[in-house]
């Protein structure tokens, strides 16, 4: 915000105080920007500490997550339908995979959310750990996450391996290392695995839930004009 805009804002606020008007008036343009600004504020609290406890949700539009490698334990997944906002009261049903890790180590993390503010495209971009460049680096910048759950319409990996896998378990009974993965439908297909490795992970997700902590070394968070990708 420029100094001139700050000056005008202060004058307006002093004028409202003189006329007895109370509270904050949120304009339509401010409300449109709240999802990106709100997420920036929440994550900003943990930047200095490098550890964030979060439950992050984006409604009605996908966001993209990428990591060069994910090593997880206590993995569970199933297919189900969830409602996506489409401008109607009920929304529309979309088939999605819901997958959870009791614990996961990510070699780099990039996340982007695309939004339109006042008719112009913007990107909220988060980077943490080592740069996501297609090559796992390991080392001290590995990201540790606990009780990590994703809902995604598409998940890709350049290579993946599973051990201790159980296929065909009913979705409402699958567990992440002994902890239930909630939301499964009775009789629907589910799977479990003890250890999972996925290289070159890309997920077009609608929900990311972290009920435990996630370490975010080298965290950067930017709001950029245009549609930026990882």
Image (spheres, rainbow, N blue to C red):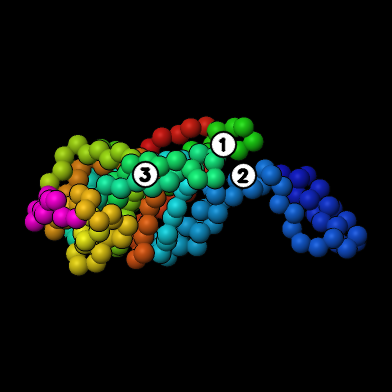
Q: Quadrant of residue 182?
A: bottom left
The C terminus: image quadrant? top left
Q: Is residue 169 magenta?
A: yes
Q: Is residue 100 above or below residue 230?
A: below
Q: Nearer the viewer, residue 117 or 229?
A: 117
For image coordinates 33% across by 51% down, the residue present is 150
Q: Secondary structure at mark 1?
A: strand
Crowd band around label 2 with a 10 angstrom C-alpha radius: few (<14), some (14–19), many (20+): some
Residue occupying the point 21% across, 53% down: 187
Residue bearing the label numbered 2: 32
Q: List the residue tagged with mark 3.
A: 205
Q: Is the Cβ of the residue at disc 1 closer than 8 Å to that at disc 2?
A: yes
From the viewer's side, name the closer residue of 19 and 6. 19
Report which residue position mark 1 lands on.
116
Mark 3, Cα crowd under 10 Å, few <14 / some 14-19 / many 20+, is: many
Q: Nearer the viewer, residue 174 or 114?
A: 174
| First of labels 1, 2 by sequence position | 2
Label 1, label 3: how far apart the Cα atoms are:
18 Å
């Amino acid at each position: 915000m420029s100094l001139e805009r700050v000056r005008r804002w202060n004058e307006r606020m002093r004028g409202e105080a003189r006329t007895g008007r109370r509270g904050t008036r949120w304009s339509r343009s401010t409300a449109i920007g709240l999802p990106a600004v709100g997420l920036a504020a929440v994550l900003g609290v943990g930047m200095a500490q490098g550890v964030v406890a979060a439950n992050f949700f984006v409604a009605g539009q996908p966001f993209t997550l990428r990591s060069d490698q994910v090593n997880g334990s206590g993995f569970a997944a199933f297919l189900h339908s969830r409602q996506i906002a489409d401008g109607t009261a009920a929304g529309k049903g979309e088939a999605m995979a819901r997958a959870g890790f009791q614990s996961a180590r990510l070699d780099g993390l990039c996340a982007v959310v695309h939004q339109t503010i006042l008719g112009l495209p913007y990107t909220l971009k988060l980077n943490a750990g080592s740069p996501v460049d297609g090559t796992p680096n390991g080392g001290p910048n590995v990201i540790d996450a606990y009780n990590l759950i994703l809902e995604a319409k598409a998940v890709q990996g350049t290579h993946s391996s599973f051990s201790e896998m159980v296929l065909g378990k009913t979705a409402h009974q699958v567990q992440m290392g002994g902890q239930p993965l909630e939301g499964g439908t009775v009789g629907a297909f589910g799977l479990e695995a003890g250890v999972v490795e996925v290289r070159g992970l890309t997920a077009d997700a609608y929900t990311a839930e972290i009920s435990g902590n996630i370490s975010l070394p080298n965290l950067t968070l930017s709001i950029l004009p245009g549609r930026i990708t990882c």
